[in-house]
Image: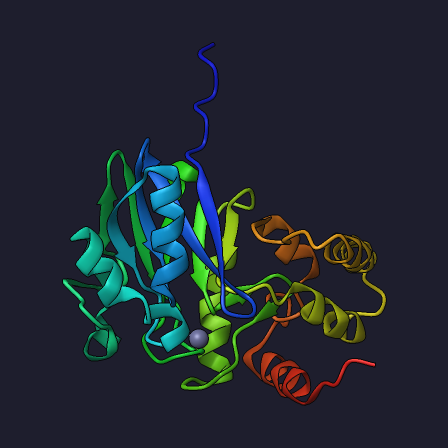
Amino acid sequence: MPPLPELPPVHRVPAFADNYIWLFEYEPGTVAAVDPGDAAPVLAFVERRGLAISHILNTHWHPDHVGGNRAIKAASGCTVVGPAREADRIPGIDRAVDAGDGVMLGAHEARVLFVGGHTAGHIAYHVPSARALFSGDTLFAMGCGRLFEGTPDDMFQSLARLAALPPETRVFCAHEYTLANACFAVTVEPGNAALAARYAAVQEARRRNEPTVPFALAEELATNPFVRAGSPARLGEIRRAKDAFQPA
Ligand SMILES: [Zn+2]
C-alpha cells in the first residue's frame, strides 16, 4: 500500500481580537488566503516564511473578512474570489462564485457551497482533497453565525449542507468563539456527555492560550446545538437565546 498523502499545511494568522485568517498552502510555497480582514499580519507572515499568495478566498462581505483584500492584491497580484451574491461588496473581486463552482488551487479543488444566513450571500469553501472546510462565519465550534441578513430557515439549510460533508472534515472557521459558544451550548444540552467533555477540554485549552480551531466536523455533529437543532424553528429559538446569553 502506498503511504497516505500528507495533508497540505493550513497556516493560522490571528487578526483583530479573535479572527483567524487561514493560509492554505496548496502547493509548497504558494498559499490561498481565506478572509484576510487585515493585510498587515498576512503580508508579514508570508514575508517571514517566503510564501507567495496566489488567491484570496472570501466567504462574505463583512469588513473583518475582506478589509485586507486591496492591499494584499496590490502586494501580490493575487486573484480575489468571492461570493457572487455579494460581489458588489467584495473589494477587488476578480471572480464571483456561487454554489456548484470550483476554484482550482494546484491539484486541489475548492468547491463552493452556498450557506446564507449570517449574510445573504455567504459561501463556504470545501476542499475534499485536503479534508478542509473554510466555513467563514457560518459554522463555529459549538456555534453558528448571527443571523444578520437571513432567517433561521436559511441557517438551518446552510448547517445541514455543511453537516452532510464527511465527518473527518477539518473545519477552519474565522473566529475563536469556542469557549463562549461552549459555555452557552451546555445550557441548551445539559445532558450531553460529549458536549460536557468538550467544554472541559476547551476550557483547559484556552487557559493555556491554545487555539481550538480547526476541529473535526464529527465533533459538531455530537456537540453543536445549532447543528443538532432538528428544525428551523428550534434553531431560531436557540439563536435568540444565544444572542441574549450572558455567561455567568
Ligand atoms: Zn461576519
- Residue 28 vs 230, above or below: the answer is above
- Is the image coloured rainbow, by chain, by secondary structure, or in one colour? rainbow
Q: Position of residue 197 (x, y in %)?
A: 82, 54
Q: Residue at x 63, y 88 (%)?
A: 240
Looking at the rendering, in which quadrant would you find the C terminus?
Answer: bottom right
Quick check: can you spot residue 164? no
The x and y percentages for residue 39 are 34, 62
- Where, by quadrant of the figure, is residue 131 drawn? top left
Quarter of image, ligand 1: bottom left
Work out whether residue 218 or residue 61 is closer to the camera in this orientation and state it. 61
Outermost residue to the top: 1
- Residue at point 68%, 70% (across, down): 181
Q: Is residue 222 left or right of residue 199?
A: left
Residue 177 appears in view = yes
Q: What residue sits 44% from the left and 51% below the top?
A: 133
User: Closer to the camera, 228 or 88?
Assistant: 88
* Count of all numbered marks drawn on residues in the image: 0
Q: Residue 107, position in %: x, y?
A: 26, 33
Q: Is residue 157 above or below residue 54?
A: below
Which of the pair 51/109 is nearer the observer? 51
Q: Is 234 left or right of 170, judged from the image as shown? A: right
Residue 56 falls left or right of residue 201: left
Classify residue 67 by image quadrant.
Answer: bottom left
> Where is residue 71 drawn, in percent x and y?
24, 64
Asked whether, in this view, residue 243 is left or right of residue 96, the answer is: right
Residue sitting at 39 percent across and 79 percent down? 119
